Image (spheres, rainbow, N blue to C red):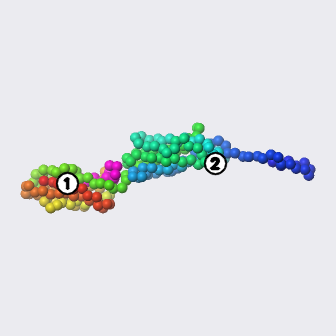
Amino acid sequence: VIGTVGSVNDSTALVAVYPGAVWSITVSPSAATNVNADTNNITVYGTAKDAQGNMVSDGTSVTWSIVTDAADSSLSIVNDTTISGLIQTLLTTSHVAGDTYYVTGTSGSISGTTGLITIIVGDEKSIVLSPNAAQNIVVNSVVGVNATVYDSWSNALGAGIGVTFGLTPGNGSLSPLSTTTNAGGIAQTTYTAPATAEEIGTISVSTDLKGTVDRKSVV
């Protein structure tokens, strides 16, 4: 501040303008976001501003919290403080496909929340045939065979995965030999037993993704 009287002036006062109190907290991801079950974490960012849109002062306290019904989740930072108006934490989720989360940052009565965070299935890890043990089957009878594709966390992978069935040494028949999984991650075929008793066959199954194989004997 400079004061002037005639030709005389003096500057003795320095005026500093500081940000106001927290008026808004914006948290991202703000849109609905999927997290792979294999990854099971996501970084959440926040921005705290005053009523004029200025970043709030450094050291402003913000508390992070989770809204979820999932049994297993955590935040790397709960009690956060701003640096240049910015905050962040790491959400560690479960590995269960379908689990959902919201993360909220709160300062006083002001809060901001992410969009819906949803866990989706991971990469293919295994394929399991059912029936899952040797079966005694009457000659010429028909038995349904299912193959379910899973990730590393026992989540079924869902629809559209190509699956191929095989039968060794060829006693009986399978139909179809190739199909795709349904929404539950299950591919289905039918085994028809041969007309001759005491024949042994082994059903195998593999996928288009990684060639994962499971085999079961039928008698």
What number is the disc on residue 204?
none
Residue 163 included in the magenta stretch of the image: no
The residue drawn where x is 43% and y is 51% is 35
- Taking the view exactly as shown, the residue that stands out farthest to the right is 6
In front here: 197 or 13? 13
The residue drawn where x is 8% and y is 55% is 198
| Up/down of 61 relative to 43, above or below | above
Q: Earlier in the sequence, mark 2 or mark 1?
A: 2
Q: Crowdedness of circle 2 by 10 Å Cα count: few (<14), some, many (20+)?
A: many
Q: Is residue 120 left or right of residue 214?
A: right
Mark 2 residue element: loop
**Cα gap from disc 2 to disc 1, whole angstroms:** 64 Å
Mark 1 residue element: strand
> Label 2, on which residue?
55
Amino acid type shown at disc 2:
Met
> Label 1, on which residue?
216
The residue drawn where x is 40% and y is 46% is 94
- What percent of the width, then of the height, locates residue 70? 41, 42
In front here: 49 or 60? 60
In front here: 198 or 159? 198
Residue 150 included in the magenta stretch of the image: yes
Q: Crowdedness of circle 1 by 10 Å Cα count: few (<14), some, many (20+)?
A: some
Q: Is residue 10 left or right of residue 67?
A: right
Q: Is residue 186 visible?
A: no
Magenta residues (range): 146-157
Q: Is residue 19 left or right of residue 125?
A: right
Q: Is residue 69 visible?
A: yes
In front here: 182 or 46? 46
- What percent of the width, then of the height, locates residue 92? 45, 47
